[in-house]
Image (cartoon, rainbow, N blue to C red):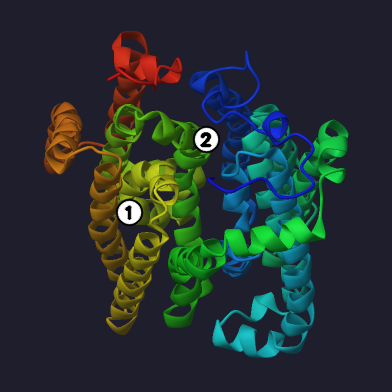
């Protein structure tokens, strides 16, 4: 990073990891890394999808609402559990700096989780009353251990991404899904169908995931980690990467809090039931991000850091942006037409309102899905101030949107306003991120327009069928079949899609 090696470095050159190579020679390319992550995430999501129709019939929307509120609290706190130093783990050229950043993250998350425990025990009655969620009483003490294992998982995850041993993460995700889903099903079938049971199972799943990942890293990297840790070096890195807590921690806190506002404010203005509807809608929208986008984000971060040094960031970014758009635009536009029918069919008629929420959120979800993996560009370009401004705009616009819907006494309007706010902020974010990587706005808009035109025949057909009043099962069948054919065509005949997933996101690839 342009700094001289600290005193005591036996052989700094030997300790460097090659950013351009992305790790050890001979390892898999972009596609292999993404595929490794996607495989584990796919298995985890298959378990969740298979269990969801059963869980939505065992637990009520109010139960899922309590889980959503608890999850919102823990996600907000987990965001700053390492003060965002976890991002810095990817950046140093010298491996021992990365090791000391990992040790720094573990120290910080331990301290923050210990502070949380007495606070949530003492102030539990106040928090429960403020959120209009009496069902949370007796469960808020779990916030502290959840924040600890969640924050530790994030730090280990970035160490793992730097090492490019993505198979570890896949194993952790699958085992976590088994533990979480198994705990929820066991509680529901055993007659303990409560929000508290969902919260307990979720905490168990996160703890298992962290334990599995930590055990694998300890097994493989013990010598690399322990022999390089230095309190003096940790202090130096604390200062060297101070922009992360000064800018990125506030930026991340605003970002995650803005995400959790629906789960926190819908119960206040309405009831936990609306939070339950939103949580299921949001979980289904998140699945493509968890399945593909999250994997691409981790691999893209490492590749983009290398591409910046090598001068081909624009080519890499445009290739990944185009593929992300092809993955998400067609299916989410389809969901915008048939979401209500889809949820009623899969999860039961009680959840049709969650499907309508998904329809309202679908266009926003497209922009979010695309910008999320690419958001690391502003960190690579060291523009943390921009990230803070974007997240402040996100937070304020979402807060205003939800409060407006609450004052108008309409949860549907609250979700609609929330979605419109997201479309504005994330649309602008996409254009700026691509601009930072060297892609002009005109080119970005042209790529998006091409995807929309591809969907128009199906969209017009579904609108026509709804106007003439055909059965809902017909809309659902046509929409699902069209998405299946679209992805089959994409895999078989789209050369750019195959090129990016074959690891060809390097100079000269379009």
Residue neighbourhood size for the residue with mark 2, other residues' Cα within 10 Å, grouped as few (<14), some (14–19), many (≥20) = many
Give the vertical position of 402 relative to 418 (above or below): below
Residue 102 at least partly seen: yes
Residue at 36% in and 21% down: 484
Q: Are marks 1 and 2 in contact (CB under 8 Å)?
A: no
Query: In the image as oriented, which residue stretches furthest toward the top?
Result: 492
In percent of width and height, residue 112 lies at 72, 71
Q: CA distance from mark 1 to mark 2?
A: 30 Å
Q: Secondary structure at mark 1?
A: helix
Q: Disc 1 or 2, which lies upstream in sequence? A: 2
Residue 202 at least partly seen: no
Residue at 73% in and 84% down: 119
Residue neighbourhood size for the residue with mark 1, other residues' Cα within 10 Å, grouped as few (<14), some (14–19), many (≥20) = many
Give the vertical position of 506 relative to 401 (above or below): above
Q: Is residue 32 left or right of residue 211?
A: left
Residue at 40% in and 17% down: 504
* Residue placed under numbered mark 2 in the picture: 302
Residue 201 lies in what quarter of the image? Answer: bottom right
* Residue placed under numbered mark 1 in the picture: 361
227 or 445: nearer the viewer: 227
Residue at 38% in and 64% down: 385
Q: Is residue 154 left or right of residue 203?
A: left
- Which of label 1 and label 2 is nearer to you? 2
Label ID, residue 377:
none
Q: Secondary structure at mark 2?
A: helix
Q: Quarter of the image for the N terminus: give it.
A: top right
In percent of width and height, residue 34 lies at 53, 26
Residue 506 lies in what quarter of the image? Answer: top left
């Amino acid at each position: 990073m342009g700094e001289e090696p600290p005193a005591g470095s036996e052989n700094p050159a030997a300790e460097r990891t090659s950013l351009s190579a992305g790790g050890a020679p001979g390892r898999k390319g972009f596609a292999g890394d993404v595929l490794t992550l996607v495989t584990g995430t796919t298995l985890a999501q298959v378990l969740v999808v298979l269990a969801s129709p059963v869980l939505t019939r065992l637990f009520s929307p109010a139960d899922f609402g309590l889980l959503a509120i608890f999850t919102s609290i823990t996600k907000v706190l987990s965001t700053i559990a390492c003060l965002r130093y976890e991002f810095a783990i990817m950046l140093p050229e010298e491996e021992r700096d990365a090791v000391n950043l990992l040790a720094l993250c573990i120290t910080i998350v331990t301290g923050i989780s210990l502070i949380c425990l007495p606070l949530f025990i003492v102030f539990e009655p106040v928090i429960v009353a403020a959120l209009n969620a009496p069902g949370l009483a007796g469960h808020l003490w779990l916030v502290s251990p959840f924040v600890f294992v969640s924050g530790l998982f994030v730090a280990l995850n970035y160490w793992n991404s730097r090492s490019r041993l993505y198979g570890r993460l896949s194993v952790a995700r699958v085992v976590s899904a088994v533990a979480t889903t198994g705990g929820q099903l066991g509680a529901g079938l055993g007659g303990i169908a409560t929000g508290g049971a969902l919260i307990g199972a979720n905490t168990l799943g996160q703890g298992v995931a962290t334990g599995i990942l930590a055990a694998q890293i300890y097994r493989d990297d013990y010598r690399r980690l322990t022999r390089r840790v230095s309190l003096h070096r940790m202090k130096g890195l604390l200062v060297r990467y101070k922009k992360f807590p000064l800018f990125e921690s506030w930026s991340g806190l605003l970002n995650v809090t803005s995400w959790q506002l629906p789960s926190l404010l819908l119960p206040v203005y309405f009831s936990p039931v609306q939070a339950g509807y939103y949580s299921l809608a949001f979980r289904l929208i998140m699945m493509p991000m968890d399945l593909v986008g999250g994997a691409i984000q981790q691999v893209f971060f490492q590749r983009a850091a290398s591409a910046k040094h090598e001068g081909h960031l624009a080519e890499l970014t445009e290739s990944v942006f185009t593929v992300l758009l092809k993955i998400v635009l067609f299916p989410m536009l389809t969901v915008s037409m048939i979401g209500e029918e889809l949820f009623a069919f899969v999860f039961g008629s009680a959840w049709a309102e969650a499907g309508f929420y998904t329809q309202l959120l679908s266009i926003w979800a497209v922009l979010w899905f695309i910008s999320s993996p690419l958001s690391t560009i502003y960190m690579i370009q060291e523009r943390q101030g921009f990230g803070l401004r974007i997240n402040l705009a996100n937070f304020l616009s979402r807060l205003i949107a939800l409060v407006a819907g609450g004052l108008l006494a309409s949860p549907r309007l609250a979700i609609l306003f929330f979605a419109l706010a997201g479309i504005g902020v994330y649309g602008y974010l996409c254009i700026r991120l691509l601009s930072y990587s060297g892609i002009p706005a005109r080119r970005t808009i042209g790529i998006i327009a091409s995807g929309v035109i591809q969907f128009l025949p199906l969209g017009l057909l579904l609108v026509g069928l709804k106007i003439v009043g055909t059965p809902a099962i017909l809309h659902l069948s046509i929409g699902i079949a069209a998405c299946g054919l679209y992805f089959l065509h994409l895999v078989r005949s789209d050369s750019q899609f195959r090129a990016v997933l074959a690891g060809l996101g390097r100079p000269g690839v379009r």
